[in-house]
Amino acid sequence: MFIDALCNGLDEIPANKELREALALELEVKGLEILLEELKEKDPEFYAQVDQKNPVRVLRAIEVIRLTGKTFTEMRKASKKEHPFEIVRFIIEHDRDKLYERINLRVDLMMQQGLLAEVQSVHEFKTLNALRTVGYSELFDFIEGKTSLDEAIELIKQNSRRYAKRQLTWFRKHMDANLIPFDTQEKMLLMVVNELTKI
């Protein structure tokens, strides 16, 4: 989202606070699956590309559809602006096995540095969207006795790997991107500079 905002600008798609609140209540009462079905029926193109486990994105799309009568895809395309600069994309390519190994080690390090205590300190606020993230959700389940600590840690690793896979898929949709093999910062920076000098 941040990369899209930087490259494409912020959209001028309308919003409605009352409708958003009503949709949040609908999500709580009916669940995400019902809303996903509505999105699939009314905007199959966006349904095919959205993270279907992210209620914020799903609710925003349905908000726009109900508010305007147009698809979210249509509204996003209409709101794109021309830029006075050229966009050059670089994607760092990791070996998948090594990337997953780094993710696993990072989770272990986060646990050693007090992630569990951090999650315990905000447990009472667990329903906030900001806390429905990988790392927090799994440890909330542990705190509530739904899983063991070992199971929660393994789920954090598994869900982090899945998130990384989705990110890679998202990046690869940019066919014009320059792929930079993961290496030292100096070597990767040199590759970027070399590509930029060709422009």
Image (cartoon, grey):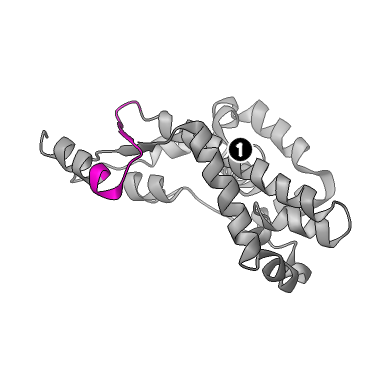
Q: Is residue 93 left or right of residue 28?
A: left
All told, the count of numbered labels is: 1
Magenta span contains residue 164: no
SS label for mark 1: helix
Q: Residue at x 57, y 35 (%)?
A: 50
Q: Position of residue 112 (x, y in %)?
A: 64, 64
Three-letter amino acid code at the position of disc 1: Arg
Q: Position of residue 15 (x, y in %)?
A: 54, 53
Q: Read off the residue under disc 1.
A: 162
Tell me the quarter of the image containing the C terminus. top left
Q: Position of residue 152 (x, y in %)?
A: 76, 51
The picture quadrant where one finds residue 38 is: top right
Residue 121 or residue 100, whichever sits in front: 100
State whether residue 26 appears in this view: no
Read off the magenta span. Answer: 175-188
Q: Residue at x 65, y 33 (%)?
A: 39
Q: Residue at x 74, y 63 (%)?
A: 126
Q: Is residue 191 left or right of residue 104?
A: left
Q: Position of residue 56 (x, y in %)?
A: 62, 49
The picture quadrant where one finds residue 80 is: top left
